[in-house]
Amino acid sequence: KFKLPCIITRGNNVYGPHQFPEKLIPKFTNQILRGRCVTLHGDGSNTRNFLYVEDVARAFEVILHKATPGQILNIGGDNEMSNLVVAKKLIEILGFKDKESELITFVPDRKFNDLRYTINSGKLHELGWREEMDWDEGLKTTVEWYKKHTSRFGNIEDALVAHPRIGVSPGQGVTNTDLGVTNTEI
């Protein structure tokens, strides 16, 4: 109707330096660096497809120059793995493989947590984009960044709990009455 030159993109789990520590990879990295167990939701079998941040930036560059307005493009990689596999890899990278069983703890899963989500990036590949960062190398680069720069986020303790709610103290939930809403209004 308005003839705006829009392109819609949908992406998978992006990882890399500078990501806020409530997300899986920086969260687990920071938990391990602080001598804590990683907090895996459920049994850790939920899978995610991870894509390095610089590959995502390259995808946007390709889309900007080669996509057609009105297109919908998925941005995804080839690194689908369970959260348990990711946790074990981070423990290994950080040099604690001998303590792996001690550093993994399972917590109740989030309600309505997806077991798996992945996307087909075929249209983006047709435009010439390819994932360039190797999973192992990207993960090592990310871990090294967090080892050096985690302090720039300030106090991240609330982000490192099993089910973070930024702005809410650990163990304190927000109830409907806290929001001034009654059940009849929901």
Image: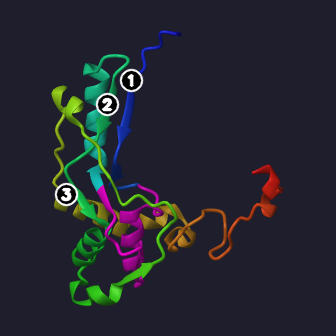
Q: Position of residue 20 (x, y in %)?
A: 46, 58
Tag 2: amino acid? Leu
What is the quadrant of residue 177 in the picture?
A: bottom right
Q: Could you give the CA–CA distance between mark 3 and mark 1, rounded to whole angstroms?
A: 28 Å
Q: Which of pointers 2 and 3 indicates the residue nearer the eye?
A: 2
In 3D space, how far apart are the residues under numbered discs 1 and 2 (Cα atoms)? 8 Å
Q: Is residue 96 left or right of residue 172?
A: left
Instruction: Please name the residue that numbered disc 1 is placed on.
Output: 7
- Bin the neighbour count of mark 3 within 10 Å (Cα to Cα): few under 14, some 14-19, many 20 and up: some
Q: Which callout, 2 or 3, points at the residue further toward the start of the chain? A: 2
User: Would you say 117 lies left or right of 34 here?
Assistant: left
Residue 87: where, in percent of width, then height? 30, 73
Image coordinates for residue 84, horizontal then vertical, percent = 30, 72
For label 2, the residue is 73
Is 141 colored magenta in this rendering?
no
Kindly identify which residue carries mark 3: 135
The residue under the point 47% across, 13% down is 4
Q: Nearer the viewer, residue 2 or 146?
A: 2
The span picked out in magenta is 19-48
Residue flagged by tag 1: what amino acid is it?
Ile
For label 2, the SS is strand
In the displayed structure, 174 sits above or below 103; it is above
Task: Using the image, determine if residue 68 lies above or below residue 166.
Answer: above
Q: Residue at x 82, y 57 (%)?
A: 182
**Depth order, front residue of 118/130:** 118
For the residues labelled 1 and 2, say whether their Cβ atoms are less than 8 Å apart: yes
Q: Earlier in the sequence, mark 1 or mark 2?
A: 1
Colour option used: rainbow
Residue 157's quadrant in the figure?
bottom right
Please name which of the two marks, 3 or 1, marks the residue nearer to the observer: 1
Q: Residue at x 47, y 71 (%)?
A: 109
